Image: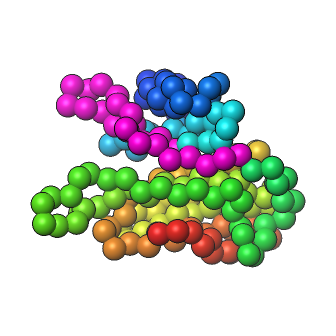
């Protein structure tokens, strides 16, 4: 659910604003354990995982990774070679115990779909979410993944095509 009024959104905007000039939040997802906020700035966009500390205060991460704005126009039709334009993915999760890897992580993605995209499904061995792209094509999703999962992203178009989306693991 897109929750731009969530108090964590202001924390994300302030964190990104400290290093990127004018910023504004364009989407936010509340996944109980965290809020994923997509922030646009003059230079690009950043996905920010905001978590609550033990006292219930929302905190931003020390390191944030974003991507520069792209100048290519939004395609009019979904292409098999690149079903989601401007795709950005990110993983986050609890710290691993000494001597072992993380038990689970969160996988988040955002991008832009062509107007003929009907839904985007993101799934792992433990979670699945299906979202409808916004009118401007923006899609944002977050799922829980197992430590060895390679999440699957699929775009379904209005004409019934199902296209797998390649992404970095």
Write the start and end of the magenta stretch as one range: 47-69
Please tell me whether residue 40 is drawn above or below residue 123 in the rendered image: above
Residue 99 on image: x %, y %:
13, 66
Residue that lies at the very extreme toward the front in this rendered image: 19
Residue 65 on image: x %, y %:
50, 47
What residue lies at 64% left-to-right and 33% top-to-bottom? 41
Depth check: give the residue in front, 148 or 114: 148
Describe the colour scheme in one phrase: rainbow
Residue 122 on image: x %, y %:
52, 63
Residue 75 occupies quadrant: bottom right
61 in the magenta segment: yes
40 in the magenta segment: no
Depth check: give the residue in front, 133 or 160: 133
In this view of the protein, can residue 26 be seen by the observer? no
Residue 142 on image: x %, y %:
47, 53
Please tell me whether residue 133 is drawn above or below residue 117 in the rendered image: above
What residue lies at 32% left-to-right and 67% top-to-bottom? 146
What residue lies at 12% left-to-right and 60% top-to-bottom? 98
Residue 114 occupies quadrant: bottom right
Residue 62 occupies quadrant: top left
In this view of the protein, can residue 72 be seen by the observer? yes
User: Left or right: 121 with respect to 160?
Assistant: left
What residue lies at 72% left-to-right and 69% top-to-bottom? 82
User: Left or right: 28 with respect to 83?
Assistant: left
């Amino acid at each position: 659910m897109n929750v731009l009024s969530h108090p964590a959104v202001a924390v994300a905007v302030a964190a990104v604003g400290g290093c990127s000039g004018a910023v504004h939040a364009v989407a936010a997802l509340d996944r109980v354990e965290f809020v994923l906020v997509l922030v646009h700035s003059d230079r690009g966009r950043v996905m920010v995982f905001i978590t609550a500390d033990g006292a219930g205060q929302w905190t931003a991460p020390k390191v944030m990774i974003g991507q520069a704005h792209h100048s290519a126009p939004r395609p009019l039709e979904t292409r098999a070679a690149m079903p989601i334009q401007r795709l950005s993915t990110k993983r986050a999760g609890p710290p691993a115990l000494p001597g072992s890897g993380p038990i689970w992580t969160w996988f988040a993605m955002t991008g832009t779909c062509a107007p003929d995209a009907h839904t985007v499904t993101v799934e792992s061995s433990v979670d699945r979410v299906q979202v409808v792209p916004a009118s401007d094509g923006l899609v944002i999703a977050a799922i829980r993944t197992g430590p060895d999962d390679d999440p699957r992203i699929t775009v379904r178009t209005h004409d019934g095509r199902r296209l797998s989306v390649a992404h970095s693991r």
